[in-house]
Image (cartoon, rainbow, N blue to C red):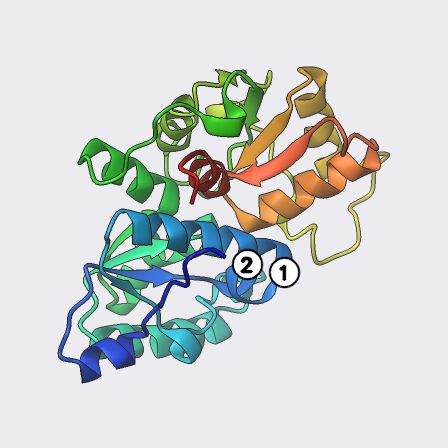
Amino acid sequence: MSEAIKVPTMAEMLAANEVPEVLFWVGCAGSFDDRAKKITKAIVKILHKAEVKFAVLGTEEGCTGDPAKRAGNEFLYQMQAMMNIQVLDGYEVKKIVTGCPHCFNTMKNEYPDLGGNYEVVHHTQFIQSLINDGRLKIEGGGAFKGRKITFHDPCYLGRGNGEYEAPRQLLEKLDAELVEMKRCKSKGLCCGAGGAQMFKEAEPGNKEVNIERTEEALEIKPSVIATGCPFCNTMMTDGVKHFEKEDQTEVFDVAELIAQAADL
């Protein structure tokens, strides 16, 4: 049986007069979507292995307001953001690790306009820093050694915030064959989730955008499509199922690959 990991809330830490090194912002998908919960668990295992003193908000964590803002409802966005900022400031939070690029982008770039100023990092950036600081060691790639892996750039991590290298540096730790799609990094094609295609009917056309993106990925015949976003994960997984390639290509978050390689 695997080791049970206690994940404290900020309220519990405050009651114990303790201060965490980072707040892990789980996000809506990581909290409620069964597939994304596995990504959350992988991140928690990595933080625990690296002996990072962390906490979550638990039921005090609300939606960042990103969906409302992208949909044009600025009033609702500001209401949701201000509620979160009040909670974060109440706990004197300094550094936040997010499991989702959408939360990462909103809290990093848009909360400061409402008075919410924090150091916000994406989980791939934080995991890479743990390796750089010698707090987390990956020896060999475990089950992924030698396998062909391609990385799909999440829009709000890549083009939105210019972070292309952290996830790729982590994949290189797996001793795998990292192969790029023809459209990658700054020219990477959105899977559709960033444009809310997960939640609405398709735009006019003859092909869903996640199908086209998955088609590009499958052209290079990877055994793994790696992502850094729970919504990209869903879109690419649906794409792989569309082409009935589940027995040849798996979709994982980078954190899941690292956790498995570290035998966590």
Q: Is residue 194 visible?
A: no
- Outermost front residue: 1
- From mark 1 to mark 2, how far is it between C-alphas? 5 Å
Q: Which residue is mark 2?
A: 37
For badge 1, the amino acid type reads Asp
Query: Taking 196 as reference, is 86 left or right?
Result: left
Q: Residue at x 52, y 26 (%)?
A: 144
Q: Which residue is mark 1?
A: 34
- Outermost left residue: 17
Q: Position of residue 184 (x, y in %)?
A: 53, 23
Viewport quadrant of the C terminus: top left
Pointer 2: residues within 10 angstroms few (<14), some, or many (20+)? some
Q: Position of residue 259 (x, y in %)?
A: 44, 42
Q: Residue at x 53, y 28 (%)?
A: 143
For badge 2, the amino acid type reads Lys
Under circle 1, the secondary element is: helix
Query: Taking 257 as reference, is 136 left or right?
Result: left
Pointer 1: residues within 10 angstroms few (<14), some, or many (20+)? few
Q: Which of the 4 image quarters holds residue 58?
A: bottom left
Q: Residue at x 41, y 26 (%)?
A: 168
Query: Taking 158 as reference, is 15 left or right?
Result: left
Under circle 2, the secondary element is: helix
Q: Residue at x 55, y 54 (%)?
A: 38
Q: Is residue 125 visible?
A: yes
Residue 35 or 206: which is nearer the viewer?
35
Q: Are marks 1 and 2 in contact (CB under 8 Å)?
A: yes
Query: How many numbered dots are placed on residues in this image?
Result: 2
Q: Position of residue 7 (x, y in %)?
A: 35, 67
Query: Would you place residue 17 above or below residue 257 in this image?
Result: below
Q: Position of residue 153 (x, y in %)?
A: 51, 33
